[in-house]
Image (cartoon, rainbow, N blue to C red):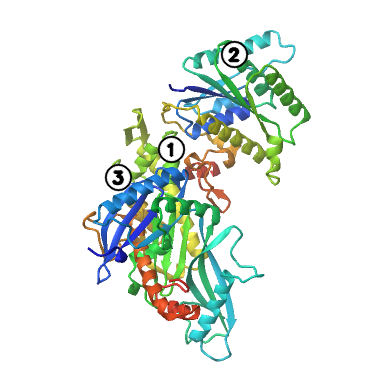
Amino acid sequence: MKSPRDIYLGIDLGTSTIKVVVAHFTPDNTLEFLGKGEVPSLSMFKGEPDQPGIVTEQLIQAIESALKSTALHDFPNHIALALSGGYLQTNTVSATIDIPSGLPITENDCVTVMRQVYDQLTPTDGQTGVVPFGKIPLSTVVTRNFRLADGRIVFAPMTQISSKLTYDALYFALDRERYQRIISIIDEALMSRRVDFTVPVPLALSCAVCPPTSVADNLPLPLIIDLGAGVTSLSMPTPTGWLLAEQLNIGCDHLANDINLVFELNDIKTARTLVRDLGTYRCTAIPVQDGDARMLTFLSPKGAKLEIAANDLENVIEARLRELFTIIAQRLEENQAYDWLDQEVLLTGDGALIPRITELVSSILKRKVRLATPYKVNAIRFFDTIPPRYITICGLLRAARQEQLLKEERDQQGNVLDRIGIGLRKAWQAIFEW
Amino acid sequence: MTADILLLGIGTAGSRAAYYIYQRGGLPGLRIMAADSGDEINETPSTLTAAHLPLPPKVPAGEAARTANDTLNGILEAERKNAQMLFIVTCLGGATGAYYTQAALLYATLHNLPAAALVAMPHDFDSEECKWTAQSTLDTLRAQHFKVLSLDCQTFGTLFPDASREAAYSQAVRWIAETTLGYLKLFSLQENSRSGIGKGPTDKQRTRLGSDSLPRGIFTGVPATFYNGENLDLPTYWRQHTKQ
C-alpha cells in the first residue's frame, strides 16, 4: 500500500449523487481506484446545495464509505474538488500587443501579452480589474487562443508574422456567497483538512477523456459534452488550453421536472425514475409517433397507479433535449468553435445513457456522436466499465495530479514569468497555475 | 399527531396562488382548493379541486348574501371533514376576495376550526376603490380578531421599479404562494396523498398567465436559467406549445 502522500481523494458534489474516489497513479500513469463512495445528494439543484446541512451529512457518508473501502485510516495527502454549478461562470479576458514590423512572434512576445492578461485579473491598488463585482476569480486561468492582426486564430503563434498579437484567456469567476456555501460544506465534512485542488468540471472532462498527445497541433478539436443531472458542461481542449470550457445550467433534472409538471405527477421522485429507466420502459429520445399504442403503467411511491402514453413522454423529452443541444450548437457558433470541431462528439454524464440520445445529438450537431470513455483507468474492483457519471471525477484526479507535478516543478523554477513559460510550452497546462 | 390543512385560494389572485402551490407539489398533509367567481376558475386542471362561487352580493346583501354563503359553506362542509386547520390565501382588493374571506373565516369560527388568512394588499398603481376595499376589509377582519397576515404589495412593488403591472401581479401571486409554503411548512407533518395525471395548464392559461406565472416545479426558489430571454426552467414542451 502506498503512503497517503501519493494518494488522491476526489470529490464530485453532483446534483444527483455525491461521488468520492480515492485513487493513485501507477508508474505508467494509469489511474487506479482504491476506494469509492457514492450517496444520493438529496438536496442539490443545478449543482448547488439547497439545504447545506443535508448535503454535508451526505458528503460525510460518501467520504467515510470511500475511505472504508481502502486500507487507509487517514485522509490522503491530496484532496481535489470538482467545481460545477450556477455559481461558476466562464469569462474571457484579452490583451493585445504590437509586434515590431517584419519580425516573427517570439516566445517572449507571448509571455508579455499573457502577462498583461494576468495583470487584468490581479489588479494592483487603484486599478479596476475585469472581474465583475461580487465575483472572485479562480486561480486557474487557461489559454483560449491567440489571434493575429488579420483575425486568424492560432494556438501556437511563435514564428508567425503579424503586426499585432492578441491573447484570449478563459478564467472562471465564482459567485462569492454561493461558492462560500460549497466551501463551508466541504470544510465541515473534511474537518481539519482543506481542499488542495479545485478544478472546474469542463476542464476535468477533457483531462479524463483525451490523453495529452491526442490533441495535435493540426487539429481538429474534440468536443466533450457532459449531460449531468443539474448542469451540462462543454469542453473543447486545444494543444495549449481550451477553446471552449463552459457550462449550461440545464441537466437531466430539467427532464424530470418537465415530466413532473407536464403530466402533473406531483412526484419528482417518480419523474426522476422515469428519466433514469427510460430504456426499461422502451422509450427513447427520438419519439415514435404511435399515439396511445404504448401505455406506460407504473406505481407511484405512494402506491397510486399511473398511466402515461410512451409517445407523450418521448415528445416531452425530445423537446427538452433538442432545445438543449440547439443551444450548444449556438454556443459553438458564437465561439467560432464549429470550424475547429472534430468529426466526432463525445457524450458523458448520466444523460449520455438516454436511449438514442446519440442519434438525436448527431442530427443537431451534424457530427458523429458516441459515449466517451476515460483513458487509462483501472477501477475493476468497483465497475466492469466506468459509468459515464464517473468520468468527471477521473478527470478531476488527473488534473489534480497534473497540478501537483507542476507545483513541484514550479517550486524549482521561480517567478511568474518562468511559470508562464512552462505553461506555454506544455500542452494541457494553464498559464499561471497549471 | 398529524396535520391536515385545507388551503383555500379565494378570488383570482388567491386561486392562482393556490394553483402555483399545487404545481409545486404542495406540502405533506396539505389539501389545496381554489374558489373564484370569475371564469378562469373553470379552466383549472381537473386534478386541482376548484369551485365556482356566485358573484359576491352588493350592500344591502339580503337574499344574495345567504345564497353566496350557502355555496361557500357547502364547499367548506365537504372539504373540512378531515381538516385540522383552514388557511386562506387571497387578495383583498377584489370583491370576491374581500367578501368570501370574511365568510370563510366566520364559517371556521362557527365550526371551531382553527383558521388564518394570508392576504395581499393592492399595489400602488391599483385604484383608490380597490385600496379602500382592501383596507376596510382588513380592518373589519382584524376587529373580529381573525388571524390575518397581510402582504404589503405597495411596498413590495417598489423593489421592482422596472416591472410592468402584469409582472407585478405575477410576482405578487408568487410572493403569496412562497410565503404560504414557508408559513405552513411548520404545520405540515404527514405525507401528501395526492397523485394523478392531468394535462397541465391549458393553452389559454399559459397564454394569459405568461411564463412568469407558470410554475418552475423543483426549481422554484433556485436562480432561474435564462437563455436569450427565455426561462429554461419551464418545460420546453409548454413553451413551444404556447408559441405555436
Which residue is tagged 1? A260
In the visual, does B96 lie left or right of A232? right
Q: Secondary structure at mark 1?
A: helix
Q: Secondary structure at mark 3?
A: loop
Residue B20 spot, x, y in % from top left: 54, 33
Which residue is tagged 2? B109
Residue B243 spot, x, y in % from top left: 55, 44
The image quadrant of residue A211 is: bottom left
In the visual, does A276 lie left or right of B147? left
Q: Residue type at mark 2: give it.
A: Thr
The image quadrant of residue B147 is: top right
Q: Residues within 10 Å of mark 2 (few under 14, many from 20)?
A: few
* Chain under numbered label 2: B
Q: Work out whether disc 1 and disc 3 sit on a shared chain.
A: yes
Which residue is tagged 3? A279
Residue B84 spot, x, y in % from top left: 50, 18
Give the residue furthest to the top: B63
Residue A295 spot, x, y in % from top left: 33, 34
Q: Residues within 10 Å of mark 1 (few under 14, many from 20)?
A: many
* Chain under numbered label 3: A
Q: Nearer the viewer, mark 3 or mark 2?
A: 2
* Chain under numbered label 1: A
Give the residue furthest to the bottom: A102
Real-space Cα separation, disc 1 to disc 3, in angstroms: 18 Å
Above or below: residue B123 compared with residue A389: above
Above or below: residue B54 compared with residue A166: above
Q: On residue B126, which mark appears? A: none
Q: Residue type at mark 1: give it.
A: Asn
Q: Nearer the viewer, mark 2 or mark 1?
A: 2
Asked if one can make out residue B204 in the rendered structure from this viewpoint, the answer is no
- Nearest the viewer among A281 and A36 is A36
Q: Residues within 10 Å of mark 3 (few under 14, many from 20)?
A: some
